Amino acid sequence: MTASPTPAGARSSASLEPGWAEEVRALARRRDAVLLAHNYQLPEIQDVADHTGDSLALSRIAAESDASTIVFCGVHFMAETAKILSPDKTVLIPDAAAGCSLADSITVDQLRAWKAEHPGAVVVSYVNTTAAVKAETDVCCTSSNAVEVVASIPEEKEVLFLPDQFLGAHVRRVLQRENMHVWAGECHVHAGINGATLTAQAEANPDAELFVHPECGCATSALYLAGTGAVPADRIKILSTGGMLDAARTSNAKSVLVATEVGMLHQLRRAAPDIDFRAVNDRASCRYMKMITPEKLLRALREGRDEVRVDPELAARGRAAVQRMIEIGQPGGGE
Ligand code: 13P
Ligand code: SF4
């Protein structure tokens, strides 16, 4: 395989003012700020951050950090989650308009109506939800620990899983759990990575491993390919973005097809420079993630904006669900 083209939405550092990264570091020190970047951020944002990771790892770092300010280079629900966990810290996001189509796929009123149809059910919300939805949730999860979170709920209890239908289908498949209802939401980026493309690429690259994010529309196709023997099951890995990095570090593969947002390729290539990583869909770029630019990061640090505020009453109601999320799947975390 040849190298993937520059990911859509990526920009070259050549157009930036020289010294911008040093200025970011200096301003962060002055503000006593820790800089967190999600794996889907622009490469130059990932490189300047103190920590880059998946949504679970970043939530844990935000909760444990001693810094008085958290600058979250990611999307709004991630910064909101950090604020829920650390209400006394200042949380900044370089652009508060960086939303998430998946978080928008369920409102708190829709969740209340769904709960009313299933009294007594345990509500499991993916972290990609608003603070208001988290306040109506029993336990949150991310793609790295969704299976463990649902497995921790007594078998006789009904489960309402929201909002991602593909992640929900993945969890239901792994746990063979019938009493689990899944909301029909989706992320527009991951839903656009379809099974036909994945199948064609897997057939054209018979030696490549497949790393598939469970939010993808093709996750079912990947498991189907494994089930039919068309692709050996050990070549297909359904992984969170953090799980992809762990797998890359220990893989012996020469090439890997990656089914997730294209920002992920940057960390994968750094983690395993000898592996040829190629995006299954090189147009799978999240416009919200790419709203965080070096210019806006500098503005955030210079002007202390955009500050993320969560209504204290909502935050208090959502905190236990988020805390449970960061404990589950953690060494010593029980499940
Ligand atoms: P991870 O939990 O794998 O970081 O994915 C979250 C996500 O899709 C953010 O958009
Ligand atoms: Fe939301 Fe999808 Fe973007 Fe992730 S990639 S932030 S789930 S819209």
Image: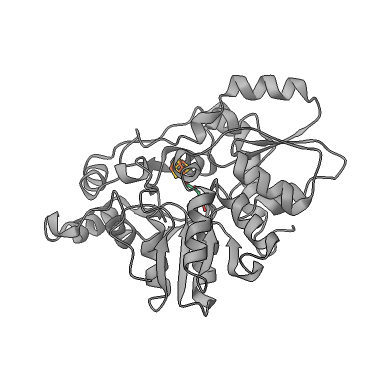
Relative placement, left or right, of 107 versus 138 is left
Can residue 87 be seen here?
no
- Give me the residue at 81% from left, 38% from top: 179
Quadrant where ligand 2 appears: top left
Query: Which percent across, then down, holds residue 226?
Result: 65, 62
Residue 231 against residue 81 in the figure, above or below: below
Query: Which percent across, then down, holds residue 303?
Result: 23, 39
Relative placement, left or right, of 57 versus 148 is left
Residue 211 against residue 184 in the figure, above or below: below
- Give me the residue at 48% from left, 44% from top: 82
Q: Nearer the viewer, residue 50 or 100?
A: 100
Disc count in the image?
Answer: 0
Relative placement, left or right, of 231 versus 304 is right
Can residue 178 be seen here?
yes
Residue 79 against residue 118 in the figure, above or below: below
Q: Quadrant of the C terminus?
A: bottom right
Determine the image quadrant of residue 118: top right
- Give me the residue at 42% from left, 38% from top: 76
Q: Quadrant of the N terminus?
A: bottom left
Residue lying farthest right?
156
Relative placement, left or right, of 191 versus 31 is right
Query: Which percent across, then down, holds residue 147?
Result: 69, 52
Q: Nearer the viewer, residue 102 or 34?
A: 102
Query: Which percent across, then down, holds residue 250?
Result: 54, 77
- Give me the residue at 30% from left, 58% from top: 43
